[in-house]
Image (cartoon, rainbow, N blue to C red):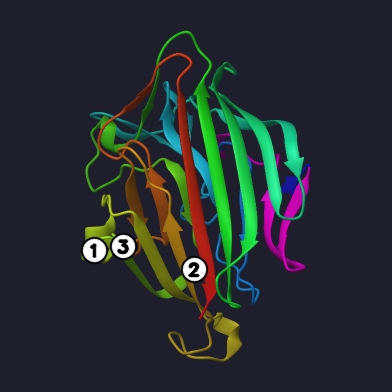
Amino acid sequence: MSDIEELELRVAGRTVAGYALQPDIDPTNVPRPYLHPVRTLAGTVVTDVLPADHEWHLGAGMAIADVAGSNLWGGRSYVRGQGYTWLPDHGRIEHELWHRRSEGVLEHGLVWRGHDGAELLAEHRTITAEAGATAASWTLGFGTRLTNVRSTPVEIGSPATHGRGEGAGYGGFFWRLPPVEDMRVEARDPNTADRARGEDLVNGSALPELTVTARTRVRPDSGAEPGSAGGRRFTLAFTGMAGADRWFVRVAEYPAVGISFAFRHPLVLAPGSVLTRTFTVTLTDG
């Protein structure tokens, strides 16, 4: 894989994230801009790209399984009554123009195109990197504004809206973690005592904050025992849900966190309407 252009975000002189603007990847993986590698301040990489189990998972960024009948997620599409099926329905998300570009801000316009090349959505994306509240943390901001540029409604869907169960309502902001051990997830409402712990309870939850703690997996050639303290521990704290958004979480099958726009029901954007979200992820060592 090669990138036509590679960009970086920096905090206090340290590179904390790479941004692949126009990745040269298989069309079935839906070429699109994404963040990778994303690192803690100590240098621990907390994203993965093109993993063997789901090679269309690309770091951290935007991806949606069904946008007006086109696959903007990658891989097979879920068809009601048939299950996952390979279809010629893959679109792409393309960089269009820059608005701002510095070591702490990447702001640009993008076009979401369907499988036939038609423009489905226009996106204004702002990514920021700032120092955190502690010396061991920094905060990634990810703002997106999606506009329906068509003369007809655009329906956003997921495998769940097409009949798949198992809480498979993925699609929106998505973060694929690298191989980890001892991954724990907790969602909570800071204004109440409401909490949910573990994959089964957090997946599909609407609680506004989610925290992931994990330890990087020890390499087989490191000489350390699996599960030992040889891996680096880190914490990711996510916020930014709105409307009918829900958390999408996977721990047992693969490590990932998403904020999904159509977890149970389709989201319909009328012509000219705008979907605006601002996500934050605070990355902390230890």
Amino acid type assigned to the residue bearing label 2 in the image: Pro
**Measured from the top left, where is residue 235 in percent x and y?**
47, 71
Which is more toward the observer, 259 or 65?
259
Q: Residue furthest top?
A: 151
Occupied quadrant, residue 25: top right
Circle 2 sits on which residue?
179
Q: Which residues are magenta?
A: 5-29
Q: Is residue 23 magenta?
A: yes
Q: Is residue 58 visible?
A: no
Q: Is residue 58 left or right of residue 95?
A: left
Amino acid type assigned to the residue bearing label 1 in the image: Ala
Q: Is residue 236 above or below residue 78?
A: below
Between disc 2 and disc 1, whose residue precedes? Answer: 2
The residue carrying pointer 2 sits among few (fewer than 14), some (14 to 19) or many (20 or more) residues within 10 Å by Cα, namely some
Q: Closer to the observer: label 3 or label 2?
A: 3
SS class, disc 3: loop
Q: Residue furthest front?
A: 191
Q: Is residue 86 left or right of residue 103?
A: left
Circle 1 sits on which residue?
196
Q: Residue at x 46, y 55 (%)?
A: 53
- Label 2, label 1: how many angstroms apart (C-alpha)? 23 Å
Q: Is residue 255 above or below residue 4?
A: below
Q: Residue at x 56, y 36 (%)?
A: 30
- Label 3, label 2: how many angstroms apart (C-alpha)? 29 Å
- Count of number-bearing discs: 3
Between disc 3 and disc 2, whose residue precedes? Answer: 2
Which is more toward the observer, 62 or 2?
62
Circle 3 sits on which residue?
190
Q: Is residue 219 left or right of residue 96?
A: left
Q: Residue at x 31, y 66 (%)?
A: 186
The residue carrying pointer 3 sits among few (fewer than 14), some (14 to 19) or many (20 or more) residues within 10 Å by Cα, namely few
